[in-house]
Image (spheres, rainbow, N blue to C red):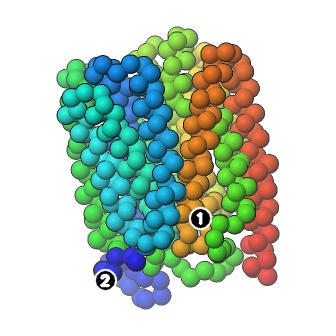
Amino acid sequence: MSTPAETPASVEQPGTGGKGLPRAAALRFVVFLGIVSFFADMTHEGARGITGPFLATLGASAIVVGVVSGFGELAGYALRFVFGYAADRTGRYWPITIVGYTINMLAVPLLALAGNWPIAALLIVAERSGRAMRNPARDAMLAHATSELGAGWVFGLREALDAAGATLGPLIVAAAIFFSGSYRVSFAVLLVPALLTLVVLAVAQRQYPRPRDLEVPIGHGRLETVGIPRIFWVYLAGMGLIAAGYADFPLIAFHFGRANVVPPVWIPVLYAVAMATEAVAALVLGRLFDRIGLTTVVGATALTALFAPLVFLGGAVLAVIGMVLWGLGMAVQESIVKAAVTGMIGRDRRATAFGLFDTGFGICWFVGSVLLGILYQASIPALVIFSVAAQLAAIPFVLRTRRVMANRSGAMAS
């Protein structure tokens, strides 16, 4: 069951005549969790760029670095279904979210104390596992605000703040390395945003102990389902194709360095450009999604599929344009893609659905990353063809989902 605490007066309830409008209460809740994401991404995205080199300083081989990174990412997605199901089964969304964030945040600064690479590897996997634990329950709580604000805006706003933190984190780490010359000091500096994450999260839980009270009763064409509908699997198949064809930044960065596309010092700057693009795009795409629905996903996918030829076949100028499109694609995946899932699933099964979706998406991403790495070694043009083709192949699945959702909404309205 949800935390049986009395909702404070500052949290307006729909139809109860609180201090303000329910919409204002929902917006404040989303901003709270957006600020949590801001500091959280500042922490783990700041560390992400230096974990590989840090493992190397502890004596880890390139194979070990690859295995640890790959397994960490796989665990970070594969466990989401387990924790999402647990959240829906127990109703303890806040406790699961808080424990997940605690593991996720404290594992990063603890890397400063790791004395050997096995301990560091364990902390890296723990950080990813904590992220897997907290995301489905957090997203399910966020979904309660969508009836007042719109699913696109809710997930877009959270992702914009998330991406802003992901932009600043690597810059903070770069500054720490510049002044100290130490990876350990950089990890230690990240203790500050890690603790701020947990403080804001605790305040949010105290202010909004029952987020489901923010949700307006079903109506006005909003879909409610029992269990996981068939269209969910169609949609997941389409998004899995996008995941399989979407090159991860480490491979892109590897290419930039190997092909001398840009000087090494500019590679993290291009990543920051992509994250800044993601932050802005998430807000714009969220608004568009609430107006035109899955047509936004179709248009954005057709556009972002062009990132691969730009970053892998072009020079410096085209690479910058490609990274902007790559950041746009990340905004799609982290905001409006999840907004669409919200409209398919009843509120008591959303954490399960989010966890299941993330697990499937992550497995496709992992398999695709391996295949893209193999293709890169064999033929860069082949990599580009596969990347573009896989993403464009997702569009018919999205169009099918759009038709089914529109028909069901029309049936409910009539």
Q: Is residue 184 above or below residue 302?
A: above
Q: How many marks?
A: 2
Q: Pick whichever, 74 or 238, lies toward us.
A: 74
Which residue is identified by label 1?
342
Name the one closer to the observer, 28 or 3: 3
**Observer able to see residue 248:** yes
Q: Is residue 328 left or right of residue 15?
A: right
Amino acid type, residue under disc 2 in the picture: Glu
Q: Quadrant of the N terminus?
A: bottom left
Residue at position x 41%, y 56% from top? 134
Q: Which residue is mark 2?
A: 6
Q: Percent x, y for residue 164? A: 41, 44
Instruction: Examine the rendered structure and indicate whether residue 290 appears above or below residue 331.
Output: below
Check disc 1 and give the amino acid type: Thr
The location of residue 221, given as percent across then percent down, is 69, 76
Label 2 packing within 10 angstroms: few (<14), some (14-19), many (20+): few
Which labelled disc corresponds to residue 30?
Answer: none
Looking at the image, tell me whether mark 1 or mark 2 is earlier in sequence order.
2
Q: Is residue 172 left or right of residue 267?
A: left
Q: Position of residue 250 (x, y in %)?
A: 49, 27
- From what the image shows, is residue 126 above or below residue 317? below
Residue at horizontal 78 percent and vertical 64 percent from the top: 404
**Helix, strand or loop at disc 2?**
loop
